[in-house]
Image (tube, grey):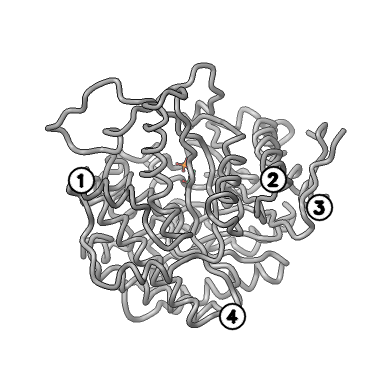
Amino acid sequence: MSFYKFPNDFWWGSASSAAQSEGASLAEGKAPTIWDHWFEQQPWRFFDGVGPADTSTFYQNYKSDIQLMKQLGHNSFRTSISWARLIPDGVGAVNPKAVEFYTNMIQELKNAGIEPFICLFHFDMPLVMQEKGGWENREVVDAYVEYTKTCFDLFGKDVRYWFTFNEPIVPVEQGYLYDAHYPNVVDFKRAVQVAYHTMLAHAKAVSAYHHSHEHGQIGIVLNLTPSYPRSSHPSDEKAARMADLLFNRSFLDPAVLGQYPQELVQLMADYNVAPKTEPGDSELLRLGKVDMLGVNYYQPRRVKARLNAINPDGPMLPEWFFEPYEMPVRKMNRYRGWEIYEKGVYDILLNLKENYGNIPCYISENGMGVEDEQRFIVNGQVQDDYRIEFIRNHLIWVNKAMTEGANCRGYHLWTFIDCWSWANAYKNRYGFVALDLKTQQRTIKKSGNWIAQVARDNGFDSGDN
Ligand code: BGP
């Protein structure tokens, strides 16, 4: 039996976000985000009509939740700060209650020996900022940078790992291309502008941090989705390259290399969707290179060359350049509709090693959302052997990449406790800890006991389950 050994200082933990876990959504001085607003407008868009006010009460229960994290063997935990809670008007005065909450929460983590990883924006645009045009408006970029500076000033002495954004492509694709998040726009050119301004905001925040708090590190969390062609036919391979360019390199290159891929710049120009820029932007991007990278990995993207002509009168979409491909006999998480392909995490890590200077990185999210987990309860505990298998199989590939030189420093599961998942609300459960929605009672699942052991041993053996 072999033992999959991880370094002694490997980061074991989980990730969450303010909007998905804090609760107290419109209380304690917090202003509405686009999620509060969208829920008010279109509650039917949310699974079972559960909105952002009903998330898992971390705001009230953070102390006992952090004790639970300790029981899970966490030495690190990522969550985010809510801009709308900290600075309710978007710019200007801070909310003292928010300062108190985040200060205490961060301190509580540190007291428990858990390194806080703090993300500054996780899909939760303050409504006042969206009313100004959101990321389409450069004023919002500057407001965001001021907000991040406030965070560095307030919490910088206790936080060593910062992240400017979580999955910045998600608000672009879901909000401006596929009508799945507010503001439900379908417009490629506007999507490009949003993407570009997000990366400018990122770069400016990185520079601001480097100027003020040299002792820590700042990065970004990207959902990297490796693109696999249906076949090695050149047209399928081209389709995969285009998907990679649009969905991965559009954020990965500026974040790590400080510039956009020339091929992407050309493509945007050819289709007349290039963003509005200002002199000096390239230099800003160059200065915005990250110290480290968080990698969220859930599923691969399989594509093939387009078989059907595009409708030139329809809206431009990324799918103009490829078609999704359903590989026969793929392994699926059917609750979420996502393919499970563990080797993808290895391919990402080796790509970072070979093409991105082997930047320090960690798996900042990976996980498996499962519906109706109550059916797996035996003696009061969810027996989520499928989740253990999912994590193990991914960790085996992470381990292999590391033995081949990949610079991976940790693994965080999405998520600590079952949480509110945007429009899917509580449909799929992801946590190491089960949440009873009615009583708010927390119970560690079997996977929680398992990860605690793995974290203690810094690994597991091949027969372990
Ligand atoms: C990631 C997000 C998380 C989380 C997770 C699970 O994209 O960073 O916020 O929600 O996905 O996905 P979902 O909630 O869509 O099931």
Secondary structure of the residue carrying tag 4 is loop
Residue mark closest to the camera, 1 vs 2? 1
Q: Could you tell me how far apart the alpha carbons at marks 1 and 3 are, in whole angstroms? A: 54 Å
| Among the two numbered marks 4 and 1 on one chain, the one whose residue lies closer to the N terminus | 4
Q: Which of label 4 and label 1 is nearer to you?
A: 1
Circle 2 residue: 444
Q: Residues within 10 Å of mark 2 (few under 14, many from 20)?
A: many
Q: CA distance from mark 1 to mark 2?
A: 53 Å
Q: What amino acid is labelled 2 in the image? A: Ile
| Amino acid type, residue under disc 4 in the picture | Lys
Q: Earlier in the sequence, mark 4 or mark 2?
A: 4
Kind of residue at badge 1: Asp
- Label 4 sits on residue: 157
Which residue, given by chain and number where applicable, does mark 3 sit on? 456
Using the numbered discs, state the Cα–Cα distance from disc 2 to disc 3 in whole angstroms. Answer: 17 Å
Q: Which quadrant is the C terminus positioned in? A: top right
User: Percent x, y for residue 48?
Assistant: 39, 37
Residue contact at pointers 4 and 1, CB within 8 angstroms:
no
Mark nearer the viewer, 4 or 2: 4
Instruction: Please tell me which of labels 1 and 2 falls first in the chain.
Output: 1
Is ligand 1 closer than 8 angstroms to the Cβ of mark 1? no
Q: Circle 1 sits on which residue?
A: 270
* Farthest residue, direction front: 234
C-alpha gap between disc 4 and disc 2 = 32 Å
Disc 1 residue crowd, few under 14, some 14–19, many 20+, Cα 10 Å: few
Q: Earlier in the sequence, mark 4 or mark 3?
A: 4
